Amino acid sequence: MKIKAAVVEEVGAPFEIKDNIDLHEVGPTDLQIHMVASGICHSDEAIRKGDASLGYPVILGHEGSGIVEKVGSEVKNFKPGDHVILSFYSDGTCDNCLKGVPTQCRSYAKYNLSGTRADGDDHFQENGKHISDMFNQSSFTTTTVVDQRNAVKVDKNLDLRKLGPLGCGYVTGSGTVLNTLQPKPGDTIAVFGTGAVGLAAMMAGRISGCIKVIAVDIVPERLELAKELGATHTINSKEEDAVAKIKELTNGYGVDWTVDTTGLPAVIKNGVDALAQGGTCAAIAVTPHLIEISTWNDLCVDDKKIVGVNMGDSIPQIDIPRLIEFYKLGWFDFDKTEKFYDFEDINQANQDSVSGKTIKPVLIIDKEYQPGE
């Protein structure tokens, strides 16, 4: 089957939309998805510019939403016409998956970051030549084929154009707080970086009952949005010392929890320094940078901890529906971070994401789609 897709030919190349891409046929546990929309994530940019690699050429995108067109012979819980959000793939059979931690699937890298399907076949080809995929999904396409474990069914009355980023950015930020850190009501939290992931973490801090939810950034407009989404305090770290201000707001102690979404060494260090005794910093950005931390001064004496978190330690089939329920209650207004772009404007959308002009660009792939249909 020929499809249209945005291809990155080599490291640092722009996205090039091609209409002659061959798509793998539907296997026994697969779904063929008509793509409606896809978010652009900073991980897509990291791979495009070569900070990480799946092999080139590559079709990126891993925050897709769409409509099931066809199902494999062994698929039981999906049917044509179902509306779905796409997320990462895990096998469901290894010890970590059976423990309920699919983000630690023993074959996570093989399934999501090898550039091929889980069975080793090419997901995409052009003129018989391999094109790498991403997350067993590659949502920068008009049609894709995914395993049923990549998909989360959603209510047809919801607007699919908005929902794709729940599959990565929003579930990563919120899951880091709700699943990994698990603050208690009355705790305090500071989030460094108010992009999509950071704002999701911040909203999760509010949902968890934190009495101080502090947003730190250098962009005034983002800090204003953070207030609208529930931050109790905001700090422009370009204008004042973030660590000193956080300690001022917490009786000199620091916060119980910090989340860094920037990946910048100096900011991660601030995230550690802003912790109270016994506090934990979650560092969750995709970054090539190294950080220097003193195990004596920064960690041991004050019993501080730094944790890495993959995809918010989430189970997409559980966590994404939970986020949708929070959204319906007005507790998780993720759509206020989004801006729609035509699929053909993918390079502009990506540039606006990199520059910070747009928090969460969403590519509209099917312009004829109408919510509720």
Image (cartoon, rainbow, N blue to C red):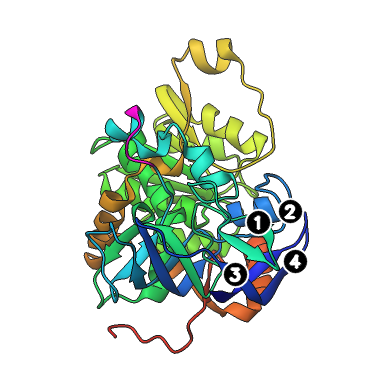
Q: Which residue is mark 1?
A: 45
Residue type at tag 1: Glu
Q: Which residue is mark 3?
A: 22
Q: Which of the two marks, 1 or 3, is nearer to us in this view?
A: 3
| Residue 112, x across and y down, in percent | 51, 46
Q: Which residue is mark 2?
A: 49
Q: Which of disc 1 and disc 4 is earlier in sequence?
A: 4
Q: Nearer the viewer, residue 335 or 368?
A: 368
| Residue 131, x across and y down, in percent | 66, 58
Which residues fall within the magenta stretch?
91-95
Tell me what residue is drawn at x 60 percent, y 39 percent.
Answer: 241
Q: CA–CA distance between discs 1 and 3?
A: 24 Å
Q: Nearer the viewer, residue 242 or 136?
A: 136
Q: Is residue 306 left or right of residue 16?
A: left
Callout 3: helix, strand or loop? strand
User: Is the residue marked by circle 2 packed among few (<14), some (14-19), or many (20+) residues within 10 Å?
Assistant: some
Residue type at tag 4: Pro
Q: Which of disc 4 and disc 2 is earlier in sequence?
A: 4
Tell me what residue is drawn at x 31 percent, y 59 percent.
Answer: 152
| Residue 188, x across and y down, in percent | 35, 37
| Residue 149, x across and y down, in percent | 35, 52
Q: Which of disc 3 and disc 1 is earlier in sequence?
A: 3
Q: Is residue 255 left or right of residue 77?
A: right
Q: Which residue is mark 4?
A: 14
Q: Nearer the viewer, residue 121 or 350?
A: 121
Tell me what residue is drawn at x 27 percent, y 62 percent.
Answer: 324
Q: Is residue 149 left or right of residue 365?
A: left
Q: CA–CA distance between discs 4 and 1?
A: 10 Å
